[in-house]
Image (cartoon, rainbow, N blue to C red):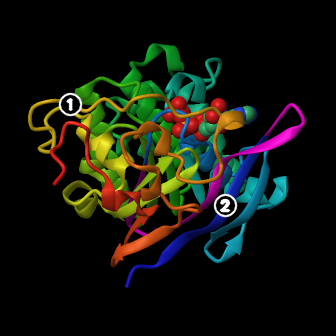
Amino acid sequence: MSQALLKIKNLKTSFRIKDDYYAAVDDVSLTVNKNEVLAIVGESGCGKSALAFSIMGLHNRAKIEGNILFKGKDLANASPTEWSKIRGKEMGMIFQDPLTALNPLMIIGDQIGEAIYLHNKNISKEQRKLKVIDLLEKVGIPHPERVYDQFPHELSGGMRQRVVIATAIANQPELLIADEPTTALDVTIQSQILDLMKQLKEDMDAGIIMITHDLGVVAEMADRVAVMYAGQIVEIADVYTLFENPQHPYTRSLLNSVPNNKEASSKLHVIQGIVPSLQFLPRKGCRFSARIPWIDVSAHEENPQLHEIEPGHFVRCSCYKHFHFPEEEVQ
Ligand SMILES: Nc1ncnc2c1ncn2[C@@H]1O[C@H](COP(=O)(O)OP(=O)(O)OP(=O)(O)O)[C@@H](O)[C@H]1O
């Protein structure tokens, strides 16, 4: 039986724009288990990063409602002091761009060493150095003693991302959140970093939330997948089911817009339009309806809910039952 590490219930993260608050994460509930990778996918602007930042307590001006239960403790409105004990220790985060995540003026050894020291003030300087070198080795950095004394700009993009990962895992977090960890890297380095993360998941029994718009990364890494659209989860299932039996029109459109996907037999589907900005997002009805105008309005629910259509497979709005691509024959 898998053990829940993180349980998010009805999470709503809203940003103030002019005089009102608008939800970028709107009633999201999900679970991450130990030794599990949950991928969160969706186009730019769907709320993936807003969700990740909420879980890590990194929004300082947003309104957070709902529950973020980490090992049973609700962190939704934890104080900065409580967060400073958890962040970097029990939870680690890997950001998309290693250059902005690293301090350009600090040598690598000191950056990782500082992350260790923050949560373990009793460790001696010598022990810290040994630990940093061990971490650099663990993430596959050659000549770790030399890299210890180097500055970020002296390393390649792939090496820098390894340093970011080494920092994120320095205190053996139980939950790792990776926001587009390989987007800035070239393909060969990408697969090395993904292999490394898989290895870490096994070694540390960690839960990982992997945010990505790359379905290849999802197929390679995820155990389960949540598809986000306009702040909501529109479909969630295990990775096999999601690729073999996608149901929500948005999921099907995403999969069908990827070259080499078997559903895309001859022509790729282009999802028309864009994710509306927060202020102009229609909050009632099916949020994806405007992008599938050929589907009759009566196919959508008024207040679309997630329906469990088979064990562990949830789909929002009954429009999935009536969905087809415009180019498909309808009987
Ligand atoms: N601090 C903020 N203040 C106001 N609006 C914000 C803020 N941060 C994010 N948003 C808005 O919230 C929505 C979701 O943004 P978010 O960055 O979470 O999307 P995303 O799916 O992670 O996109 P990307 O893949 O481009 O990072 C967007 O409309 C964005 O403009």
Q: Residue at x 15, y 30 (%)?
A: 267
SS of the residue under disc 1: loop
Ligand 1: quadrant of the figure = top right
Residue type marked 2: Leu
Above or below, 248 against 107 in this view is below
Considering every residue shown, the one lying at the far right of the view is 19
Q: Is residue 106 visible?
A: yes
Residues drawn in magenta: 16-40
Q: Residue 262 lies in what quarter of the image?
A: top left
In the rendered structure, the answer to whether residue 281 lies left or right of residue 141 reads: right
Q: Which residue is mark 1?
A: 268
Q: Is residue 33 located in the magenta-colored stretch of the structure?
A: yes
- C-alpha separation, residue under disc 1 versus residue under disc 2: 34 Å
- Residue that label 2 marks: 11
Task: Report which quarter residue 105 is drawn in.
Answer: top right
- In this view, the residue in front, 171 or 230, is 230
The image shows residue 203 at horizontal and vertical percentages of 35, 62
Q: Is residue 124 magenta?
A: no
Q: Is residue 18 above or below residue 134?
A: above
Residue 97 left/right relative to 271? right
- How many labels, in total? 2
Q: Can you name the residue that lies furthest to the top here?
A: 154
Check disc 1 and give the amino acid type: Leu
State the residue at coordinates (25%, 27%).
187
In the image, residue 168 sits, relative to residue 204, either above or below, namely: above
